[in-house]
Amino acid sequence: MISRNLRHLRVFLEVVDTGSVTHSANRCNVSQPAVTQSIGKLERDARGALFDRTRQGFFATERGKVLAGRLQRAFAHLDPAMEEISPRLRLTATTAQLNALIAVCEAENFTLAARRLGIAQPTVHRAITRIEQEAARALFERTSFGLLATRPCRALAQAAQLAFTELDQADAELAELDGAESGRIVVGALPLSRSVILPRALVEFRRHRPTLPLKVIDGRYGELLTGLRRGDIDLLVGALRDPAPIGDIVQEPLFDDYMTVVAGRNHPLAERETVTIDDLKGASWVVPRAGTPARGQFDAVLGSAGAVESVIEAGSILLMREILDHSDHLGCISSAQAEAEVEKGLLVRLPVRADWPGRPIGLTYRKSWVPTRSQELLLKSIHTVARDRVPRLPMISDPDVAPGPDGDRAG
């Protein structure tokens, strides 16, 4: 694991930039032996030479270039946020202080932050005090509810998290150079991806990376997006938002999905060859949560037609299935999500005459994200599964146009 000593890392970048221990020592205001010791420590951490040492100077090896690239990205996140608070923070701030800042921002309490970090509360308090002394101002507003971070403080905490994520990526890439596996991949899974895309993609990925830790986090879009933007999550898989909620993310479409209406096996409409909107009026529904793209389509197509009497909001296909199996409720859900339940005979897809618009399903990641080789491999697996498994269109999506035999619209 590469040292998190920020001063050593800055010294390393100076040597990459200047190719000289002497010039780097002068720029960093340290002695030449200190530069040499810093480089030696980093090379031991990196398990190999970071520089080719020649008479003409120091030149980064492949290992050194990998580390330099990640460090440049880390400080590109960190330094502007530090400058906004105090230019001196670039010289004085430590990883321990920044970790304390992140923990207090999240916990809004010194005691809880200390417990999260596994250190004493006075240690956390001293770390925050030292940063505030450099800033010559308070970074937290003390209220009866807890410590509320100021805007520059929140920006620095997020920048530090992204910088530390880049250091984790550096560890993973250096291990990959030696044919080893290091780090982990964290995927945020929105409802459709949990049953349609990720299971097969993760199985395919595991054939190539049998031991690399993988973590899949289920949650609401807003929570997952927050984790993505601060570096806790590498990518999200699921329905895309239109427009994108913020400018620092990228949305990559994989395919279009369509909504469908499902019912329990014993529902009165289960044997009908055609179901109209009028047939659905007065029905009780199990539908996705308000604010999701799927719910927006349900409200636009069925809600506006007066086909909704009562609603249960649920994001789980399992919960929906059980409710439909024990009542005359109907469900409105992604065609791709419903497909497995329909094929197993657990739910019935109703041939509803409704013009559902396509709903883009895809990947969401940080605009600044540069994946490691292992992360690239997972992305490739997801793309392969999405390409091989384009979901079917609804059984009837327009009163006058029925699907052809291969799922395409006739005519």
Image (tube, helix red, strand yellow):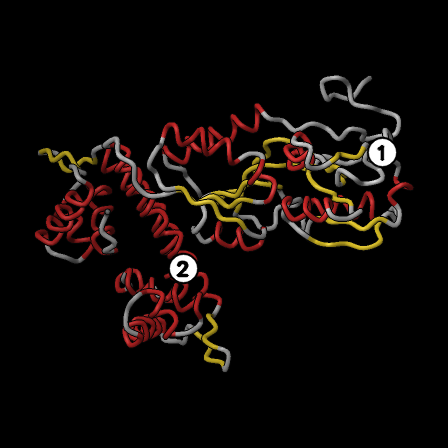
Residue 251: x and y, percent?
57, 40
Label 1 crowd (10 A; few <14 / some 14-19 / many >=20):
some
99 up-or-down from 258: above or below: below
Residue 1: x and y, percent?
24, 47
Quadrant location of the C terminus in the rendered image:
top right
281 up-or-down from 352: above or below: below
Residue 11 appearing in the image:
yes
- Tell me whether the residue at label 1 lies in contact with that at label 2, contact meaning CB atoms closer than 8 angstroms: no
Q: Which residue is mark 2?
A: 81
Task: Identify the amino acid type marked 2.
Answer: Ala
Q: Residue at x 48, y 43 (%)?
A: 235
Residue 367 appearing in the image:
no
Task: Identify the amino acid type marked 1.
Answer: Arg
Q: Residue at x 58, y 54 (%)?
A: 222
Q: Which residue is mark 1?
A: 353
Residue found farthest to the bottom: 144
The local secondary structure at tag 1 comes to: loop
17 up-or-down from 109: above or below: above
Residue situated in front as seen by the camera: 201 or 355: 201
